[in-house]
Image: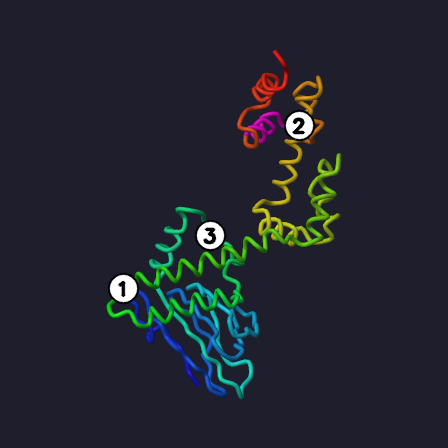
Amino acid sequence: MRKITKELVRLTNTMPVQLQDNTFYGDQYYLEHSHDYFEIFIILEGVMRHRLNNETQNLPAGTLCLIRPEDKHSVSSAVSSKELHIINIVFTEKVFNQSVLFINQEFKPACDDKDFFQPLILTAEERLLLETKIDILKKASFPGLKIALFKSFLQDVLLLISQRNFSDQRAEPQWLKQARKKIREKGNFLRGLHYFVEISGKTQEHLTRTMKRYYNETPQAYLIHLRIEEAARLLRNTQHSLEEIMFETAFQNMSYFRRCFKRYYGDPPRRYLKKSKQIFVPR
């Protein structure tokens, strides 16, 4: 039996990164534990039984996991007679935040989304890239070089996870694709959130969670967007008064309607109408 405690790993300002190469034999395992640092592990051989925050998964070789300080997890071989070989690297929250900040110069990883920390099954090319960097990291001869090499490695990990999440975003579930198509049909988006939930066939919580994952907006925000688009169309193509358009698009309060309109189009309704005439009406 092998038990991890916080005292076994000591990270300091001068050495905020530690790399460990671990092999589990037979019934050896890490008991459930938590720690005050981040951890990355890659499974090199075997199948891992990983219990994370009360959920258990069997993870194959080539899987990468990024563990947060608040997570609780345990590790063992999924097959007691087989060896489990992993590389794990622990590092401070400061190093993590510095790496995220560096990547933020180009885009922002969704690190506040718990799905960002789901296990990542690496392709052969991705695995070769990371294992090569780990080999170089092992040979680093002094702390400054080791820290710099690890930050490069961590940035690659964050980019690979972000790429996975972006690919998942493009492959939205079929039920959500159909529900969004139906709610966009004329009149349907005026029927409200309860109708959107109904045609999705899911609970409101499931619909909200999935919309936020794939489109980074709530169902209610999407409905407001559709209603504002319809309001803009009515402004351009009819002689209806602003108050009539407000009610036709299911708004009940003029100040709220104006705020929503300005949020999506950058101008309040009357100014938007004036600009649109300047654009579309010949002089």
Tell me which label, 3 or 2, sits earlier in the chain.
Answer: 3
Q: Is residue 279 above or below residue 67?
A: above
Secondary structure, mark 3, is: loop
Query: Is label 3 in contact with label 2 (beta carbons under 8 Å)?
Result: no
- Magenta stretch: residue 49 in it? no
Secondary structure, mark 1, is: helix
Which marked residue is nearer to the observer: mark 1 or mark 2?
1
In the picture, measured across the screen, residue 247 lies left or right of residue 24, that is: right
Q: Residue at x 61, y 40 (%)?
A: 221
Q: Is residue 158 above or below residue 39?
A: above
Q: Could you classify mark 2 by the number of other residues whose Cα lies within 10 Å: few (under 14), some (14-19), or many (20 or more)?
A: many
Q: Nearer the viewer, residue 71 or 237?
A: 237
Tell me which label, 1 or 2, sits earlier in the chain.
Answer: 1
Q: Residue furthest top?
A: 283
Residue carrying label 2: 231
Which region is colored magenta? Answer: 252-262
Residue carrying label 1: 145
Say which amino acid is labelled 1.
Leu
Q: Could you classify mark 3 by the number of other residues whose Cα lies within 10 Å: few (under 14), some (14-19), or many (20 or more)?
A: some
In the picture, measured across the screen, residue 49 lies left or right of residue 102, that is: right
Q: Could you classify mark 1 by the number of other residues whose Cα lies within 10 Å: few (under 14), some (14-19), or many (20 or more)?
A: few
User: Disc 3 and disc 1: Cα gap in Å?
Assistant: 25 Å
Residue carrying label 3: 109
Q: Is residue 63 above or below residue 189?
A: below
Count the marks. Answer: 3
Where is residue 22 shown, x and y percent of the image?
Answer: 41, 79
Indicate the quadrant containing the C terminus: top left, top right, bottom left or bottom right: top right
Where is residue 77 shown, x and y percent of the image?
Answer: 51, 81
Which marked residue is nearer to the observer: mark 3 or mark 2?
3
User: Disc 1 and disc 2: Cα gap in Å?
Assistant: 58 Å
Where is residue 55 shown, x and y percent of the image?
Answer: 56, 70
